[in-house]
Image (tube, helix red, strand yellow):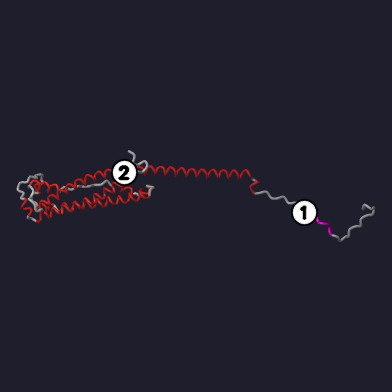
Amino acid sequence: MSATGHAAPPAPPDAPEPPHPEPPRTPRPPVLAGAPAGWRTALREFATIVAGVLCALAAQAWWQGHEERGRERDYLRQLLSDTRENERRLDEAIATDSAAARSAALAIDALTGAGAPPPADSLVRWVGRSGVASNFQPLAGNYRALLGTGDLRLVRSDSLRARLASYAAAVESEGERQGQFREIMTSGAGPMARALPFMRRVFLGDVGPEGVDVARLRADPDAAAVLFTMQAATANKLAGLRDLREETRRLRRVLEAEPGVGRE
């Protein structure tokens, strides 16, 4: 019944029912919210494992780098010791060959000069000393090992790596070159003995001037020619030794300047 006291008219039989409002939808929770404990624990464990692996790799890389730095220092110290010894041997070889070159020059001047001939004992002494030659044998084993094993990569400095490789090649080349000069000197022993017969006594340790006719030797062109051949070979030999000594000195100074290498 309505507020005025009249009854509401009945609804037509065919009228549709009014629509019912839909209930509000509850938002779906995120996937992890439904099981926070399991997923978060798994993520924490995964992160812990990854962090542990990364720490292990970092520690291994650090230790490997530490060992390589130690090997680098050991190599460079050995090379410095070898380089110093090579410099000492080069000094001795250059002194020996320089004395031989001076004696050869004096003997050639005595045989080809226009002045009075020198005493026979002086000529014998000069010729004997001109035949003395050095036998330079460099220390190259550590350089060969550094290049042959691939350990040159341990040297971090690009310029030092290049210098070491260059020096090793120079030592090998000069060693072969010195061998060739020794062969020249050896092959000249026969002609020298024929042109200068008293040289046989020199090689046997008897260097007396008896029987040496300086005037006759001055008239013999073969005598001076043999001495000139020896002088030229010695001069070329000395040039190679001096060049190698300069390179050895430069390398020695570079190695001495390396941290932890040049300290006594």
- Disc ID at residue 80: 2
Q: Position of residue 220 (x, y in %)?
A: 8, 55
Q: Residue at x 7, y 45 (%)?
A: 208
Q: Residues within 10 Å of mark 1 (few under 14, many from 20)?
A: few
- Near mark 2 (Cα within 10 A), the count class, few <14, some 14-19 or many ≥20, is many
The span picked out in magenta is: 16-22
Was residue 134 drawn as part of the magenta stretch in this picture? no
Q: In the current view of this chain or complex, which residue is farthest to the right? A: 5
Residue 18 part of the magenta segment:
yes
Give the x, y percent position of residue 108: 12, 52
Q: Give residue 257's position: percent from left, percent from top.
A: 35, 43
Going by the image, does 88 lie left or right of 108?
Answer: right
Q: Is residue 89 left or right of residue 197?
A: right
- Considering only vertical position in the picture, is 18 above or below 60? below
Look at label 1 and name its amino acid: Glu
- Please tell me which of labels 2 and 1 falls first in the chain: 1
Foreground label between 2 and 1: 2
Q: Amino acid at mark 2?
A: Leu
Q: Residue at x 75, y 51 (%)?
A: 24
Distance from the alpha carbon under mark 2 to that under mark 1: 92 Å
In terms of secondary structure, what is the magenta stretch mainly?
Answer: loop
Judge from the rendering whether residue 186 lies leftward or rightward of residue 197; answer left or right: right
Choose between 186 and 114: the one closer to the eye: 114
Looking at the image, residue 259 lies above or below residue 243: above
Secondary element under disc 2, as helix, strand or loop, is helix
The kind of secondary structure element at disc 1 is loop
44 is higher (above) or lower (below) than 184 = above
Q: Is residue 184 left or right of residue 70?
A: left
Q: Which residue is mark 1?
A: 22
Residue 226 in the image: x percent, y percent? 13, 54
Q: Residue at x 84, y 59 (%)?
A: 16
Which label number is shown at residue 101? Answer: none
